[in-house]
Every structure is written in C-alpha cells, then in structure tokens.
Amino acid sequence: MSQESFFERVYEVTKSIPYGRVSTYGAIARFLGTPRSARMVGWALNASHVDESIPAHRVVNRKGLLTGKHHFKGTNLMQQLLESEGVEVENNVVLDFKTKFWDPNSS
C-alpha cells in the first residue's frame, strides 16, 4: 500500500468521527488493519491541515492528550475546535475521555 493511499484511508476514517467525539491514532490504525502504525496516522493528520474537511482536531492520543496541538495554527486552536463541539479540555486533556471516545472498530 502506498503512503498516499494510507493517508487517504486515514482521512476517510477521520471524517467519520462524529461531531463532539474524539478518536485516537491507535484506534484508527487498528481499524485500518495496521495496529502498529499509530505514528503514521499522526503523520497523515499532520499533512491534512490543507483540507479543512478533515477534522484532525478530533484525534488525540490513547490517554486523551492533545498531542497534535502544536500542528494547528494558533496556540490553542485544537482545544478551541474541540470545545466548540462540546468536548471539554483541561490541561491539554479531554475530560470524560471514556465517554467522548469513538472507536471506529465498534461502529
């Protein structure tokens, strides 16, 4: 599989994350059948910022931490986007992460 097609598959899954919910790099990687490629999912999402239709702000690490926040313009843009969807964030961590987590593998 080429890197480009992997990135496109990451984008399709990311677009499926419901408004007001978050998923993780690892959950997306597992859904794509590549469970050890969570970091590659992060690279794909980092490259996605030119396309505003991809809600990359909805993807966090396995603990709910906004590890990708430095890839967004502005100091707190990732947090602001999540909060505008009703996802509470404190100290760069999604509050009530277990409730807000969306697993593409169970949908």
Image (cartoon, grey):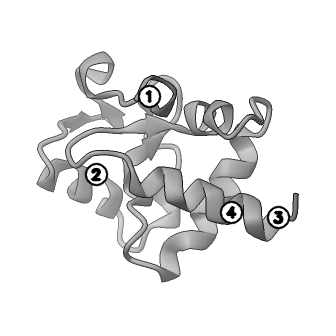
What separation in Å lies between label 3 and label 1 (alpha carbons)? 23 Å
Q: Residues within 10 Å of mark 4 (few under 14, many from 20)?
A: some
Furthest-right residue in this view: 1
Q: Quadrant of the N terminus?
A: bottom right
Write down the residue under mark 1.
Answer: 103
Disc 1 and disc 4 in contact, CB within 8 angstroms: no
Disc 4 and disc 3 in contact, CB within 8 angstroms: yes
The disc labelled 3 sits on which kind of residue? Gln
Q: Earlier in the sequence, mark 1 or mark 2?
A: 2
Q: Is residue 62 above or below residue 12?
A: above
Write down the residue under mark 4.
Answer: 7
Disc 2 and disc 4 in contact, CB within 8 angstroms: no
**48, 73: nearer the viewer:** 48
How many badges with numbers are in the image? 4
What separation in Å lies between label 1 and label 2 (alpha carbons)? 20 Å
Q: Earlier in the sequence, mark 3 or mark 1?
A: 3
Write down the residue under mark 3.
Answer: 3
Q: Quadrant of the C terminus?
A: top left
Residue 62 image position (x, y, % from top left): 52, 25
- Which label was assigned to residue 79? 2
